Image (tube, grey):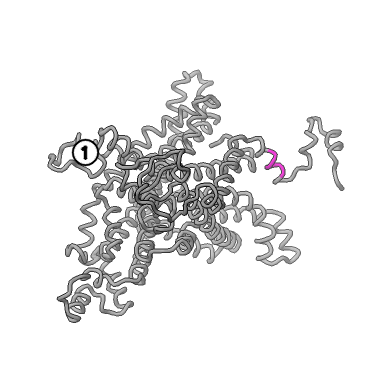
Amino acid sequence: MRTYVIRRLLYAIPTLVAIATITFLITRLAPGDPIRLFTFGATDLTREDIEALRAAHGLDKSLPEQFALYIVNAAQLKFGNSILYHKDAMSLVLERLPNTITLAVSALVLQLIIGVPLGVIAAVNRGKWIDNAVRFFGVVGHAVPAFWFGLMLIIIFSVTLRWLPSQGVLTVGKDVWDIGDRLKHLIMPAFVLALAGIANYSRYLRTETLDVIRQDYIRTAEAKGLGSKTVFMVHALRNALIPVVTALGGVLAFLISGALVIEQVFTWPGVGQFTYAAARQKDYPVITAGVMLGGMLLVLSYLIRDIAYAVVDPRIKVK
Amino acid sequence: MATTTADIAAVSPVAVPARRASAGLWSDAWYRLRRDKLTMASIVVLVILIVLSAAAPLFEEHVFKFKFAQQDLLGAYAKPQLEKPQYLLGSDELGRSQVVRLLYGGQVSLFVGFFAAAIQLTIGVSLGLIAGYKRGFIDDAITFFITVLNSIPTLFLLLIITALFSPSALTLIVILGLLGWAGITLFVRGQTFSLREREFVTAARTVGASGFRIMTKHILPNVLPFIFILAAIDIGTIILIESALSYLGLGILPPTPSWGNMLSNAASYFNLAWWLVVSPGVMIFLTVLCLYLIGDGLRDALDPRLRGAS
């Protein structure tokens, strides 16, 4: 098992190098000079001052030189100082990470506690109206543009009913440990982010449950004279849940990407929102740090998924 | 020798419905599709949406008599109403007609969706066929490339690219088309893996068919039904992504209306005119829903064993 994990970790290295290369190329090939943008409007700067700034950010070297330096630094998670904030780019992005994780994990929990029961209920009531309703929701939940759904919720619950705050993680002036206030801020973005996943899980669980209850071992369990509840809870549901566990990695990856747009709608100060703002300002160090962090989270999610596969399903040989 | 329906009925103890005995894959699928009311309804709605968007200039001129870029500051934030046809769905902060802009926005969104999907499918299917058929080094290279591509947070990448290059509709199509083909490739590759071991491929190879011919004439037609299913879902997904990007101000840029960028304007004014937020979202939702339902329906029609499975 340990060798398997180490092997998978080693596999992640070329992937991360490739991500770093792509990010580097895109940011450096893009039109627009970050120093010009940054100093825009400052009339008292001389040409020398601008050159000095350029040198300070390493932008005066040739592209291959910049790239070599960049890779060496990236390996130590150094992406330089933010052009706008004059602070280490990676630590700026990392400061926002807890907010993104909170949002993604809350969405994941919502997906599981709503999606899984929906799918099971549909499968048990196959062909009845509730089954059709869940199946229809399974498609509808995917087709709703999440950011629009967020806007609609804001209009209903924040603007009209004034029940929930529409932005941020905490009301200004409240104690940082005010959990109630934080939950109020969290509920709408988390639910919006979870919607597609709830639809997904309900579809998934329905198929899985239908598949499992046709298996021979279920008939065996029934033949042994076990009650239908025991058969269902112990034998059927446990096996139907295996793919749910193994899908977690992919779901996390999806949530991290999806959080980007939702953070924007609810002005949620997370990694995505910060990187987006940096991209609009051409703050290269922050952009690369943000994308690299996103990439690392993604690689980590896939790693978790593969390990979960190996743990849950003994049929997969650990080589 | 051709076997007629009567022959089958004569030898088979099970009665064979006469009209379906000679049905091929496509007519058989069409037969099932016609009986699937939900899918047929989705097709009808989608066709209506496409026709309405395509006919936007006609509506602009003859029905609403209001140009899509025309402003009327006195008529800003008009409520949806029947008295003035151009304000059927209200007007925005510049007094532009929401309904006319929605029709034009539909043109853009559908255009981007269809063409970006076409690029994705072209790349995805060709690479999938090549990887699956050639195997070995080429397959490893393509698979590694996909692993890398899958590990890049796509939205993050799109965000940087679009923020730094401020794309037009055309470049947006190319960017979206070049990024999302990994899933299609993996699917086609898997199918090709098993198809290439089948007898008809061996037979083709025996008579000297080239690899290119086997891939295009023998394997591709067998993958084609799945490609239609993938296409429907793919177009829907791209429309969703495009709308999100345009909403963020990174996709289609104003004054060209798209459903996404109409929402980003409306979002800043929803205290004054909440109805401006509703209609573009409903349009996106309806279009994507139809495409997804068509995808589901096609799958059921082409492979009835899967009916009701998911």
Left or right, residue A301 beside residue B286: left
B222 is within the stretch colored magenta: no
| Res. B13 visible in picture | yes
* Residue B308 position (above or below residue B142): above
Give the percent coordinates (x, y) of residue A149: 38, 41
Q: How many marks overall?
A: 1
Q: Nearer the viewer, residue B49 or A14?
A: B49
Amino acid tagged 1: Arg
Residue A257 seen: no
Residue B28 is a magenta residue:
yes
Q: Secondary structure at mark 1?
A: helix
Q: Name the residue carrying label 1.
A: A182
Closest to the observer, B276 or A132: B276
Comparing A133 with A247, the one in front is A133
Q: Main secondary structure of the magenta part?
A: helix
The residue segment tinted magenta is B27-31
Q: Residue at x 26, y 41 (%)?
A: A166
| B220 left or right, relative to A237 | right
* Chain of the residue on which disc 1 is drawn: A
Residue at the image point whose x is 66% and y is 66% from the top:
B212
**Does residue A76 appear left or right of residue A300 in this picture?**
left
Question: Residue B123, percent across and down?
Answer: 54, 61
Picture coordinates of residue A81, whole percent (x, y) = 20, 66
Determine which quarter of the picture holds residue A33: bottom left
> Residue A116, image x and y in percent?
41, 33
